[in-house]
Image: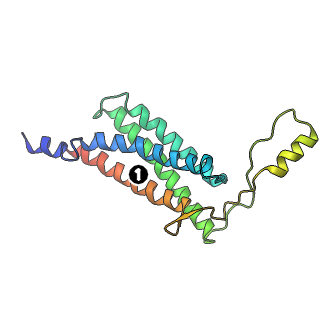
Amino acid sequence: MSQAVAAERSIAGFSPAALARIIALLLPAALLAGAFGSEYFGGLVPCEMCWWQREAHMVAVVFAALAFTAPVRSSPSRTLVLLAAAGIAVSGAIGVYHAGVEAKIFEGFTQCTATPLTKGASSAELLKQLIRAPLVRCDEVQFRFLGISMAGWNAILSLGGAALILLLSFRGKRA
C-alpha cells in the first residue's frame, strides 16, 4: 500500500474529503436539531438573529446533502462541501455578532420578533394574538450552558466546524 493511499485512509477509515462531507452535513443538522429542540421541548423562543443563524445552517444542510449526489473526490462534491462550510461559517459569524449583542459589546437591533398573525382574523382576535405573542429580544440571553449563550456555542461550534471542513477538504486535495 502506497503512502498516499495510507494517508488518504488515515482518519477513522474515511478519506479526508469524505470526512469533510460527513461533517458538513451532520454539524449543521445537529445544531439545527438542538435549536429546534430547545424551542419545541425546552420552551425557548428564538429571536430574529437566532433565525438568521438557523437559516444559514439550513442552506448548509442543502449544499452538504447535494454533495452526496456526486463522487466524493469529484469537483462538484468538493464545491458543494465548501459552499456548506461557507454557510456554516456565516452562521458562526452571525453567532459571534449575536453573542456580542448579548454581552453588550455591540449594539443590536431593537425590534422584537413574534409569531405570525392569523390572516383573516378579526381585530379582536389579532389583538389577542399580539398580547399573547412572546416578546423576544436579541440582547437578552435566554439560556446559558457553562456560562456561554446558545449564540456563543453556535459561534464556537460553527466556526470550528467550518475550519475543520476546510482543513479536511484541502488535505484531501493534496493527498
Q: Within 10 angstroms of label 1, few (less than 14), some, or many (20 or more) residues?
A: many
Picture quadrant where residue 44 is located: bottom right
Horizontal relation, residue 121 to residue 153: left or right: right
Determine the residue located farthest toward the right in the rendered image: 123
Q: Which residue is mark 1?
A: 162
From the viewer's side, name the closer residue of 38 and 15.
38
Horizontal relation, residue 6 to residue 63: left or right: left
Determine the residue located farthest toward the top in the rendered image: 69
The C terminus lies in quadrant: top left
Instruction: Name the residue at 30% across, 29% down.
Output: 71
Instruction: Name the residue at 74% across, 61% down.
Output: 110
Horizontal relation, residue 59 to residue 169: left or right: right
Picture quadrant where residue 75 is located: top left
Amino acid beneath label 1: Ala
Q: Position of residue 16 (x, y in %)?
A: 26, 44
From the viewer's side, name the closer residue of 76 and 9.
9
The colour scheme is: rainbow
How many numbered tags mark residues here? 1
From the viewer's side, name the closer residue of 62 and 82.
62
Instruction: Name the residue at 19% across, 43% down.
Output: 8
- SS for dot 1: helix
Determine the residue located farthest toward the left in the rendered image: 1
Horizontal relation, residue 131 to residue 83: left or right: right
Q: Position of residue 6 (x, y in %)?
A: 13, 44
Picture quadrant where residue 68 is located: top left
When the figure is inspected, residue 77 is found, relative to residue 112, above or below; the finding is above
Q: Position of residue 83 (x, y in %)?
A: 44, 42
The N terminus lies in quadrant: top left
